[in-house]
Amino acid sequence: MNLCIVGTGYVGLVSAACFAEMGNDVCCVDINPEVVENLRKGKVHIFEPGLDEIVKRNTEQGRLKFTTSIKEGMEHALFVFVCVGTPSKPDGSCDLSFVYQVGKEIGQNMQDYKIVVDKSTVPVGTADKMRSIIAEELKARGVSLEFDVVSNPEFLKEGDAVNDFLKPDRVVVGTENVRTAELLKALYSPFARSRDKLIVMSVRSAEMTKYAANCMLATKISFINEISNICERVGADVRDVRVGIGSDHRIGYQFIYPGMGYGGSCFPKDVKALIDTSRQYEFEPQLLASVDEVNNRQKHVLSGKILKYFEPQGGVVGKTLAIWGLAFKANTDDVREAAAFELIRDLTAKGMKVRCFDPVAGPNTRKEFAGDPNVEVVDEQYAALEGAAALAVVTEWNQFRNPDFERIKKTIKAPLIFDGRNLYSPSFMGELGFAYFCIGRKDPK
Ligand code: UDX
């Protein structure tokens, strides 16, 4: 099948590469000429395990093409996927200007029947708005063409995106049109082989499903973070509590790891956007507002522990903290809404210096803190420890799980670790002679 994919971010590029991998002819459109130029050469601008290889292979074999022209991209396509960004506005609502701009351009360039697929996460009602934007453009051109707008939200996780796309738990298709549903079923049949994996529903239900899924997951995380804060105070250990509750299959073990609060491009934005949508419909979403608040508070838990620890020692002014992990989670270079950045801001505001390391998110962090003399990003894990008063572990990269603790002890000023991801065993850390602070467990004296 012939596809046009507009937007080459995590969702667009991964979808394009995976569709091409199944033999489809895919043309990607991006407004950034540098990104397009690089992609043509097989150079991928985002870090996503396995993506380079599949982009390169399909580009070489001619199934994956790149252009800055939506007109060219759409020319032979039956499906036009809209995968452009939907950032948060300062008030928490979703900025749909990129999506609607694409809608306009689709209307301006359409020559025959197209199925326009909203894959970006967009508030309920966006597909209807897209339909009217395209219709207006067609009217202005004085042409009458048939087209369809469907919702097909994407559930992939950064860091595991290719895998998630190739083996999805489900594919949600929102359309009232039976023929369109059949065409999408055919397109997705290599990924969602068993029929019940493809779930067809109304456009609005599909749009809502994406928000409901992300808000449910965000709720699980805020729930366990709340429990962890209570555990710390009452002398319970959230690691045991997690296993204790997760063993109930109705609850499950997944997505109840306490930590630094959720970050990334989806959860914070989507929770805020659904709150905003609810308020537009004059409904106050109390639970979602709390999920968001609990998460904002959680991002300051580790800095709170660090400041409290150093308070009796004259505070943190002039001291350096080593930070391991900057990305919002492991296996990505994405630093959007990263908890590490909140930690850096909290501590540098109090006069502490930070020396940070991340396996891949160093360059993005340098960009964020360019010109700040208190923030140094180093290229080697143990180099971050030199002259540091303590180590804070913020992202759960595998290479931080079993580090050389003796080397840490030798390099750092004092054997002191603040672990925002509960990567180590408190008793083992005690045996090794570290003062060890983690999440959801009473702090050592
Ligand atoms: C998420 C959804 O998982 C995905 O389905 C959706 O399409 C996009 O949003 P992503 O943002 O890439 O994907 O990351 P995810 O792995 O879900 O983690 C989100 C955040 O939650 C991270 O900051 C992570 O560290 C945190 N998290 C996750 C926890 O703190 N505890 C957990 O138990 C799980």
Image (tube, grey):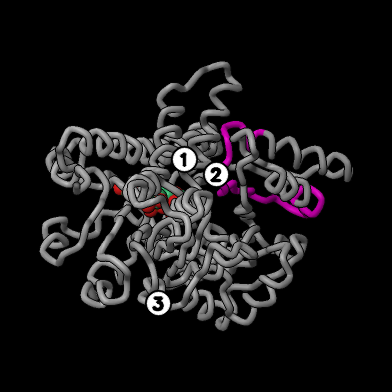
Disc 2, ligand 1: is the CB inside 8 Å? yes
Viewer-proximal residue among 248 and 79: 248
For disc 1, the neighbor class at 10 Å (few under 14, some 14 to 19, many from 20) is many
> x%, y% of residue 269?
53, 42
Q: Is residue 178 above or below residue 371?
A: above
Q: Which residue is mark 3?
A: 383
Tell me the kind of residue under disc 2: Thr
For residue 341, the mark is: none
Tell me the kind of residue under disc 1: Lys
For disc 2, the neighbor class at 10 Å (few under 14, some 14 to 19, many from 20) is many
SS label for mark 3: helix
Residue placed at 77% from the left, 61% from the top? 71
Q: Label 1 to label 3, Cα distance in Å?
A: 42 Å
Are dots 1 and 2 in contact, CB under 8 Å? Answer: yes
Q: Label 3 to label 2, Cα distance in Å?
A: 40 Å
Asked if residue 195 shows in the view, the reply is no
Q: Which residue is mark 1?
A: 210
Residue 393, quarter of picture: bottom left
For disc 3, the neighbor class at 10 Å (few under 14, some 14 to 19, many from 20) is some
Residue 40, quarter of picture: bottom right
SS label for mark 2: loop
> x%, y% of residue 271?
48, 36
Disc 1, ligand 1: is the CB inside 8 Å? yes
Disc 3, ligand 1: is the CB inside 8 Å? no
Q: Which residue is mark 2?
A: 121
In reply to whether residue 120 is colored magenta, the answer given is yes
Residue 91, quarter of picture: top right
Asked if residue 130 shows in the view, the reply is yes
The span picked out in magenta is 106-128
